[in-house]
Amino acid sequence: ICPFDSINERSEIDEVKAAIADPNKIVVFQTAPAVRVGLGEEFGMEAGTFVEGKMVSALRKLGGDYVLDTNFGADMTIMEEASELIERVLHGDGTLPQFTSCCPAWVKFAETFYPEFLPNLSTAKSPIAMQAPTQKTYFAEKMGIDAKQIVAVCVTPCTAKKFEIRREEMNASAEYWNKPDMRDTDYCITTRELAKWIRAEEISFDELEDSTFDPLMGEASGGGIIFGNTGGVMESAMRAAYEMVTNEDAPNTLIPFQEIRGMEGAREADVVIGDKTLHVAAVHGTGNLRKFIDHMRAENIHYDFIEVMACRGGCIGGGGQPRVKLPQADKAREARIASLYTRDSEVKVKTACDNPQIQALYNEFFDGKPLSDKAHKMLHSHHFVSRVADLGPNGACTPVTCPTS
Ligand code: SF4
């Protein structure tokens, strides 16, 4: 964080407004898991207040034609990532440990500082990066709308997503429709930017009636909900891997919650799936990650699956979330985390595999199963190695000049 507050995300609200005003465009919003437990703070609500319904209403009031849930994309990510883990662990097909790849800041960090781990990174794209091309293909076809008219906007806690959506490989819909100019996601706005926009339009956020997501690609499992928390991706992946391997519901005791949930920089646990015991870990913050990797190497510790999130607390603490000054910052993060776990405890469907909409998507569009050829083409990325940063002679990055001094 720049101490002078001089480095800020570039807002794309004007571009989104122009798309809304254009009668030939169809604006489709998708909202990431963590936005709904942060946005309320911008309107004076307590940290962690769950404002999903008001958030969806606000996006409709601002002019969105459809409002979809990135939690559905999180379920897609887990279907692919858990299947990949099973291939690597049970069928000896790939390098271990498998690192998560849904945090674009971690992916870039690995490309720059730990290129030796690139074969360990899951090739599964992030929830937003899976949801977006699926909107411009499956969703467009099911809804009978012209994919070329869709302007896809993600609302995220994450400033790094502004970079991720512009990565060259985020163009699966362009390949599908043979339209080279098409991007999977057109614009990215953060939680804070959305709040600013709502205020500018003089919408009384706290008086909005709750609204629900559009039904298609708008329903998710509890596993999709907790993606916003450090440890949530790992927990979701374990639930899904368990069900895929055993054909039974994942028991509540599958994950030792005390060991895996919380704000410790790195947490680890053993998870029994079938006749295998997986050694798994969740790490947040790049400082914690360096220490974790040094320790793993020094002690030669074997892990099967490691979740990495660049932000403290995971996406609920993302760079685009409402800012909370120290020392209250961790309290706010913990409240947001608790809010997502509470929501997970309230929903019936806990695992991506049991989400009927996910089942329909795979049956109707992705040739019946995760890791199919079509799923590989649209939902996976294989370009990491070619993107390793060009480091200087001493391993230094290109210096960046601070705009204030
Ligand atoms: Fe973005 Fe931070 Fe979440 Fe990574 S942890 S995806 S950088 S908000």
Image: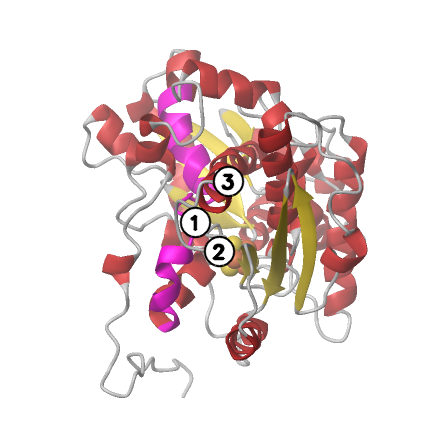
Badge 3 residue CB within 8 Å of ligand 1 = no
Residue range corresponding to the magenta coloring: 113-138
Of tags 3 and 1, which is closer to the observer? 3
Quarter holding residue 146? top left
**Numbered circle sitting on residue 99:** 2
Q: Position of residue 241 (x, y in %)?
A: 59, 37
The question of residue 252 being in magenta is answered with no
Q: Is residue 36 left or right of residue 141?
A: right
Viewer-closest of 69 and 72: 72
Residue in the picture at 44% in, 56% down: 104
Dot 1 amino acid type: Ser
Q: Is residue 16 left or right of residue 399?
A: right
Q: Is residue 126 left or right of residue 149?
A: right
Classified by dominant secondary structure, the portion drawn in magenta counts as: helix
- Rounded to the nearest whole Å, what is the CA distance between mark 3 and mark 1? 12 Å
Query: SS class of the residue under badge 1?
Result: loop
Badge 3: how crowded within 10 Å, few (<14), some, or many (20+)?
Answer: some
Dot 3 amino acid type: Ile
Do the residues bearing badges 1 and 2 touch, measured as CB atoms within 8 Å? yes
Residue in the picture at 40% in, 65% down: 110
Q: Which residue is mark 3?
A: 86
Quarter holding residue 345? top right
